[in-house]
Image (cartoon, rainbow, N blue to C red):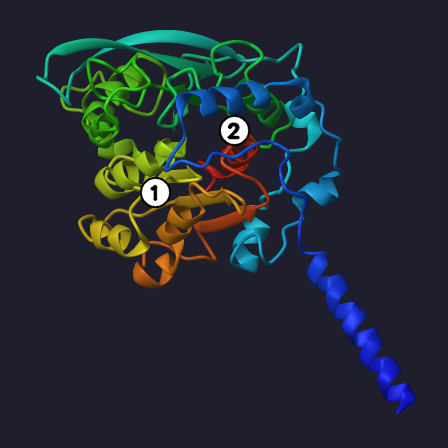
Amino acid sequence: MKVLFLLLQISFLLLLTSCSGKATEPSSKPSTNDNDQSTEQEEASQKEANTDSVVTKEPITEQTSSKTSTETTSNDDVQRAFPVVDEIPAEYLTKRTDHSGSIETVTYQTKDYFGDGSEITKKAYVYLPYNYDEAKQYNVLYLMHGIGGSEDEWGMNNDLSLVKIMMDKLIYNGDIEPFIVVTPNGRSCADFANTSADYNSFYIFGKELRNDLIPYIESKYSTFTDFKKDNYYLAETRDHRAMAGLSMGGMQTINIGMCENLDIISYFGAFSACPTTNTSTQIADKLKEFPDETIHFFYNICGTEDNVAISSASAAVSSITDLTDKLDDSKNFIWQEVSGGHDFNVWYLGFYNFAKIVFNHN
């Protein structure tokens, strides 16, 4: 009996150890508590995400950074093809002094789609890879901000931008092929510069995206769309176009990019998709309107301590691969949960992982 009792004690201790070993330390940065971010909270998260404490994280080895647990993604096959990480390697958060890309500010004409349809001028930022060459063709990622942010929220407006730093390193190290990143303002209204403007203007951004933003960006820069043709079709180059975003921008990626514009976009990345995001059932139903279009990849991430978005982000992916044949968790779908809140710790990680996946479906 003593031996049996001792064995039971040892088994119980081993069980406790294995359970506690699965947890990671929660983020030290605050998460939001409202239905989505306030302006002050998003700006605070942005400032924190650009501090030295983020850029100078303890490095982790490539072996550790490439390791994916069965809890992180849904299937061994997709894990091997696209090894997402739970922390950005410190090397990729250190600014390069050579082989560095550039950021340009552009303005384009669009309309007040939420109002009277009058002509308005909007601004966006564009990341161009190092040694950008007009003789080559580049894929394009449209990267969206949150409800309290603007085209500046991702910080892609100067050389200290973490998006730019990560892109420069990923390209230099040969992890990805060079591509263009665009950060526009997601409010399709005349009052777009007002971060407290009616949030409903976010939901009609698809008109601006299709009619104005994509045509402007992809005619100005060297992309796969041939605007010299009398009749160009964005659908012909959908393989070379992606959309991603944080919080409200994650909602736009799913509701607008995937569910309304699947004919012209084929890669999607949602980072902490906000509470008004379509559920799995809604997504699957809307995808029926695109019987011939494939989804090359759908990547999702959310913090487990995110009391703003964890429910909505989870609802968008729960059973999605059972509801539509366009998504297969062994080929083109990843749902990643990490310790963290509704902040840039999760969103920059989401960008890093998605940047390594996007345009690599082959």
Q: Which residue is mark 1?
A: 275
Q: Is 290 above or below relative to 349?
A: below
28 versus 159 height, above or below: below
Front in this rendered view, residue 156 or 47:
47
CA separation, marks 1 and 2? 34 Å
Q: Which residue is mark 2?
A: 177
Left or right of residue 169, residue 142 in this image: left
Where residue 323 appears, as percent x and y from the top left, is 31, 61
Residue reaching furthest left?
A: 116
Query: Around disc 2, counting alpha carbons within 10 Å, would you say few (fewer than 14), some (14 to 19), or many (20 or more)?
Result: some
Q: Position of residue 3 (x, y in %)?
A: 91, 87
Callout 1–callout 2 Cβ contact below 8 Å:
no
Disc 2 is placed on an element classified as loop
Q: What residue type is disc 2 on?
A: Glu
193 over 358 or under it: above or below: above
Please tell me which of labels 1 and 2 falls first in the chain: 2
Does residue 171 lie above or below 332 as drawn?
A: above
Disc 1, SS = loop
The answer, for residue 362, to whether it is visible in the render is no
Query: Which residue is the extreme one toward the right?
Result: 2
Q: Quadrant of residue 266?
A: top left
Q: Position of residue 61 (x, y in %)?
A: 76, 38
User: Residue 178, can we see it?
Assistant: yes
Q: Residue at x 19, y 13 (%)?
A: 190
Instruction: Indicate which disc residue 242 carries.
Output: none
Disc 1 packing (10 Å; few <14; some 14–19; many ≥20): many
